[in-house]
Amino acid sequence: MDVKYSVLKRTYDLHRIEYEEAALRALRSGWYILGNEMETFEKQFAEWAGVKHCVALNSGTDALILAFRALGIQKGDEVICPANTYIASVIGVYENGGTPVFVDADDHMEIDADAIEAKITDKTKAILPVHLYGHPSNMDKIKAIAERYNLSIVEDCAQSHGATFNGKLTGTFGDIGCFSFYPTKPLGAFGDAGAIVTNNDEIAEKIRLLRNYGSKKKYYNEINGINSRMDEVQAAVLQIGLKYLEEGNKERQKIANRYLTEIKNPLVQFQVPYAESNHVYHLFPVLVQERDRFQNFLKEHGIGTAVHYPIPPYVAECYKEWGYQWSDFPNAARYARQEISLPIYAGLPDEEVQYVIDVINRY
């Protein structure tokens, strides 16, 4: 059997007619930037998240960059970041001149909230929790620390659409929640797209200016901005995706539950969620000591996998001037060297899930 890691067309086919109708509606409108489709999606996503504002953008990376820009992060400012994350999280800080200050991961594969306080200095301005794999960080502890030290919180929710901690949605704990709608995400567009959510009127207005060259009216540039606008076609198809987001999350949770209960191989270690969390399983990460051997074994049996993230940003070549060593963050280093993600997506057939389980149990 051939089990690909991800097949986007299967997810598209689940609601193909509605996606196509939405795209054609946007195309036939004759208006393709900053139009009704984007405004409608912003209203729908803000309502879904239970917040006052959603500002639609070109990508999740732009959401992070503009979030920190709106907060005034600049050279000399420090932002607490997880040592294990995708590099886009760090880019959001670095592009504004800020300095990422890394904190190691805990046993749940999230930023160790108990280690944050020791990294706070008089230069610290914000904390960036990243809800990796669709699993929320320990937001109760992080929020308490932020309030104690008067720090901003920017949540990286690129993978956690619909995940909750103690019943509260990720993206709604801090000052700004940043979302990616990259096609593979729980809520995915058919190209690049992103957004921020916030309850702060001033922040929302500033990001609306920043995304459109710093202007409300063409040629009247009030601040120094960039071009980061969600196009109308992506906004239209995201309205359909949002309609079925909960359904897709439940399907991935069902697959994850099968993996958790039916994979019996002691060489394969699972991520352990917090008791207070609702994991939406954008990814299904497992840890295996001989990862290459395990991955090759699955490949030989026709099963595709992916590795997230083999080179943590603190040792990325582009940031080598920071002088970090792999050993500086042992848990992050272990996850980078042992993590491998199994197939999990809306539309993955039951027989393929069963085949993955059977092959892993034979490893």
Image (cartoon, helix red, strand yellow):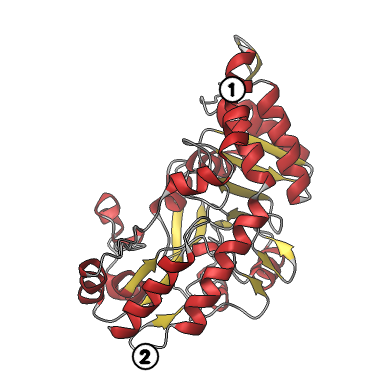
| Front position among marks 2 and 1 | 1
Q: Which quadrant, please, contains the N terminus?
A: bottom left
User: Which x, y percent locates residue 65?
Assistant: 51, 41
Residue 75 vs residue 18, the one in the foreground:
18
Residue 195 vs residue 271, the one in the foreground:
271
Which element carries disc 1, helix, strand or loop?
helix
Residue 85 in view, yes or no? yes
User: Which x, y percent locates residue 273?
Assistant: 57, 77
Q: CA distance from mark 2 to mark 1?
A: 50 Å
Residue 33 in view, yes or no? no
Which element carries disc 2, helix, strand or loop?
loop
Against 12, residue 169 (above or below) is: below
Q: Amino acid at mark 2?
A: Pro
How crowded pointer 2 is (Cα within 10 Å; few <14, some 14-19, many 20+) is rated as few
Q: Which residue is mark 1?
A: 24
**Residue drawn at 65 percent across, 81 percent down:** 275
Against 54, residue 87 (above or below) is: below
